[in-house]
Image (cartoon, helix red, strand yellow):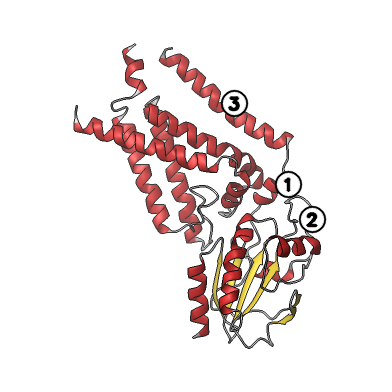
């Protein structure tokens, strides 16, 4: 088994699990998530309301696709975009000196948006990009589907 | 099941998720969600600036910033805000430790009541005090939110420390850990 394949698989499952966990922690806490998003002062309230309901399920779904290795390349590219967007939103809050709460890990996460969070999101974006480029790795449904 | 079918199912599921989310918000408007989706007012107070004078009746007598000789611990909170509700435990603990050396004042700063839907009223503030066993002084609810609008910074609760010289030495928002707030009060007392 090539070492690169093994690395992609580990990264894919770990990143998928992270998204499933962060998404699950936000489900049922739309008010807190909406407040966290509003704190960034980037989106209109009319967009924030449905986003606060949809985003947690979107994260869980994306994480599940990565863990299963289903449409891995597309899912990993979407994850890359999501992490870049999260990082950009946090960076904009830091640059504008807005003490926004990250809200990354659900309602109990009161970490304030700062540069380490930007760096963390960018590292996750790089990992997601690496997964997309090396997809799907082993133990992926994509392999089975490609064979059939 | 082949790749094509799974792809179609995935696209349909994602589209459904978005459509259902948008329709749900339109059909079941929630005042709590609407309130939470609006960014709170961003006041003009900065660290290092002079605190503007204010007076306000509180649950423990009138408060006058100019007449205050001790450092001031100021909180702007919302009775409906879960972060503010949880922060009462920390503020009670700080009040027990610093209450004789620091003037504490918490001011209601939202137009929305404790249930998250109705308009804020003095009864909501009283309910908040009783429900969370608040020990520190709570300011009277001002429907114009005059003081709160000046101080709110990023969200509820906003907490500020004002030195004896009336200069703002600290301002932050969210569920701030007790250790951080205690360190700021120790600094103000030096």
Residue at which label 2 appears: B119
Residue position for label 3: B16
- Between marks 2 and 3 in the image, the one whose residue lies nearer the viewer: 2
Question: Label 3, label 1: how many angstroms apart (C-alpha)?
Answer: 24 Å
User: Is residue B153 in sight in this rendering?
Assistant: no
Please tell me which of labels 2 and 3 falls first in the chain: 3
The answer to whether residue B127 is above or below residue A86 is below
Q: Callout 2: residue from which chain?
A: B
What residue lies at 55% left-to-right and 54% top-to-bottom? Answer: A40
Residue position marked by numbered label 1 in the rendering: B31
Picture coordinates of residue A146 (x, y %)? 33, 16
Lower sequence index among marks 2 and 1: 1
- In the depicted view, which residue is nearer to us: A33 or B135? B135
Which residue is most to the left? A2
Which residue: 38% across, 38% down? A15
From the viewer's perspective, tell me whether residue A75 is left or right of residue B156: left
Secondary structure under the numbered disc 3 in the rendered image: helix
In this view, A31 is above or below B86: above
Q: How crowded is mark 2: few (under 14 residues within 10 Å), some or many (20 or more)?
A: few
Q: Which chain carries label 3?
A: B
| Contact (Cβ within 8 Å) of mark 3 with mark 1 | no
Q: Nearer the viewer, residue B57 or A62?
A: B57
């Amino acid at each position: 088994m090539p070492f690169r394949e093994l690395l992609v698989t580990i990264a894919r499952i770990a990143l998928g699990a992270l998204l499933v966990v962060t998404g699950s922690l936000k489900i049922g806490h739309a008010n807190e998530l909406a407040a966290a998003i509003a704190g960034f002062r980037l989106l209109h309230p009319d967009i924030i309301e449905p986003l606060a309901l949809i985003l947690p399920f979107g994260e869980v779904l994306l994480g599940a696709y990565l863990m299963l290795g289903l449409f891995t390349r597309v899912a990993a590219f979407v994850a890359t975009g999501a992490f870049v967007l999260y990082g950009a939103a946090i960076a904009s809050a830091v640059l504008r000196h807005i003490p926004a709460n990250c809200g990354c890990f659900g309602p109990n996460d009161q970490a304030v948006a700062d540069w380490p969070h930007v760096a963390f999101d960018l590292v996750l974006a790089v990992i997601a990009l690496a997964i997309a480029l090396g997809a799907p790795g082993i133990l992926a449904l994509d392999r089975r589907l490609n064979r059939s | 099941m082949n790749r094509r079918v799974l792809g179609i199912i995935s696209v349909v599921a994602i589209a459904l998720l978005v459509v259902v989310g948008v329709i749900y918000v339109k059909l079941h408007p929630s005042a709590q969600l609407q309130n939470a989706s609006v960014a709170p007012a961003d006041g003009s107070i900065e660290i290092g600036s002079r605190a503007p004078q204010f007076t306000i009746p509180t649950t423990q007598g009138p408060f006058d910033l100019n007449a205050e000789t001790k450092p001031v611990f100021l909180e702007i909170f919302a009775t409906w805000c879960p972060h503010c509700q949880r922060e009462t435990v920390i503020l009670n603990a700080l009040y027990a430790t610093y209450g004789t050396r620091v003037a504490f004042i918490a001011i209601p700063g939202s137009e929305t009541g404790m249930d998250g839907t109705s308009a804020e009223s003095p009864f909501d503030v009283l309910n908040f005090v009783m429900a969370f066993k608040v020990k520190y002084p709570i300011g009277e609810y001002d429907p114009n939110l005059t003081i709160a609008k000046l101080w709110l910074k990023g969200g509820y609760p906003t907490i500020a420390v004002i030195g004896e010289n009336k200069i703002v030495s600290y301002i932050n928002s969210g569920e701030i850990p007790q250790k951080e707030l205690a360190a700021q009060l120790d600094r103000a007392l030096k």
